[in-house]
Amino acid sequence: MKKIISFIIGFFLIPSILGSATAYLFNPENYETYISFWGSIYLLIYILFPLLYSSKIKQRINKYPFFAILYIALFLLTYLTLSYATN
């Protein structure tokens, strides 16, 4: 039950925070688009996380910093892509 509640809270919280940051950096008019983009990224990471978080990584890093690393990497990739596309 705790995992389901955490998923639901994260699904509403993480895309809106990252969507707000992306909209602030690029175009506030596309706020809903950025939230839906980060919502799909959230689902993708949630599905692929068991495959990416292998036993070697478990020995070196906790799962929460690993989530943060994945989101930071995707945020930077999105930032670079959007900054290149807008120029």
Image: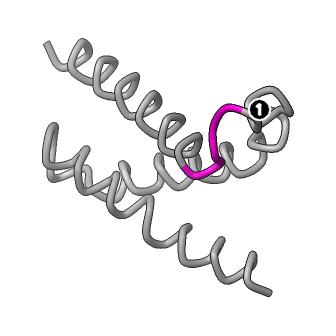
Q: Does the magenta stretch include residue 22?
A: no
Where's residue 11, x and y in %?
A: 55, 67
Q: Is mark 1 on a helix, strand or loop?
A: helix
Mark 1 crowd level (few <14, some 14–19, many ≥20, 10 Å Cα): few
Which residue lies at the image location 32% right of the left edge and 60% below the top edge? 17
Where's residue 77, x and y in %?
A: 40, 22
Count of numbered marks? 1
Which residue lies at the image location 65% right of the left edge and 71% below the top edge? 7
In the picture, measured across the screen, residue 74 lies left or right of residue 44, that is: left
For the record, the magenta segment spans: 60-64
In the picture, measured across the screen, residue 54 lies left or right of residue 4, that is: right
Q: For the N terminus, give its image quadrant.
A: bottom right
For disc 1, the marked residue is 52
**What's the amino acid at mark 1?**
Leu
* Residue 53 vertical placement versus 30 (above, below): above
Q: Quadrant of residue 67?
A: top right
Q: Quadrant of residue 3?
A: bottom right
Q: For the C terminus, give its image quadrant.
A: top left
Which residue lies at the image location 34% right of the left edge and 18% below the top edge? 81
Q: Quadrant of residue 44?
A: top right
Mostly what secondary structure, the magenta segment?
helix
* Residue 8 vertical placement versus 32 (above, below): below
In the picture, measured across the screen, residue 19 lies left or right of residue 68, that is: left
* Residue 10 vertical placement versus 85 (above, below): below
